[in-house]
Image: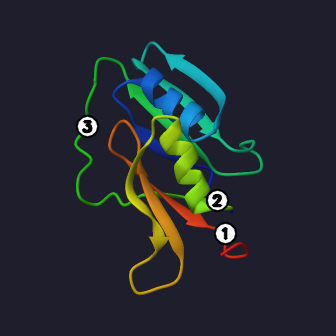
Amino acid sequence: MRILHTMLRVGDLERSKSFYRDVMGMKVLREKEFPDGQYTLAFLGYGSEQDSAVIELTYNWGKDQYDLGNAYGHIAIGVDDVYAACDRIRSRGGKIVREPGPMKGGTTVLAFVEDPDGYKIELLQDRAVA
């Protein structure tokens, strides 16, 4: 068994695809509209769906906002250099909501980014580099 994808409901599919593609550096792997169900799915990731977990963006037509609730945590992405990744993301218009540095009470170097819908993305430095 393996994790296939994480689904996020988004209020503006083009805005979210642009963020994950242009700011976070993912590729759009596939996209399909479902007119009978009035929704569109877009799958994005750093590798193929056969080899890695990806993000599924679900746009329910006519729904432009969601209450994220208090149970959702974050998506985690491993990076070689958290500081450089934050500089890249910031230069592309991304919002850093927790600047890079060691985690509280630990040595793991991390940062947090927020996507256009308010979902948090944790950037974790590869321990081999740290």
For the residue pair 113 and 68, the one nearer the viewer reads as 113
At 37% across and 47% down in the image, what residue appears?
119
Check the image and report above or below for 56 versus 113. above
Cβ atoms at labels 2 and 1 below 8 Å apart:
yes
Q: Which residue is mark 3?
A: 66
Between marks 2 and 3, how big is the CA–CA gap? 29 Å
Q: Which residue is mark 1?
A: 126
Q: Nearer the viewer, residue 13 or 58?
A: 13
Q: Secondary structure at mark 2?
A: strand
- Place residue 35 in its image quadrant: top left
> Hey, which quadrant is residue 80 in on the image?
bottom right
Q: Position of residue 97 (x, y in %)?
A: 35, 54
Q: Find the distance from the CA under tag 2 to the CA under tag 1.
A: 6 Å
The residues bearing labels 1 and 3 have C-alpha atoms spaced at a distance of 32 Å
**Closer to the camera, 40 or 96?**
96
Q: Mark 2 or mark 3, which has the lower sequence index?
A: 3
Q: Residues within 10 Å of mark 2 (few under 14, many from 20)?
A: some
Residue ranking furthest to the bottom: 105
Among the two numbered marks 1 and 3 on one chain, the one whose residue lies closer to the N terminus: 3
> In this picture, is 99 found above or below 23?
below
Quarter holding the C terminus? Answer: bottom right
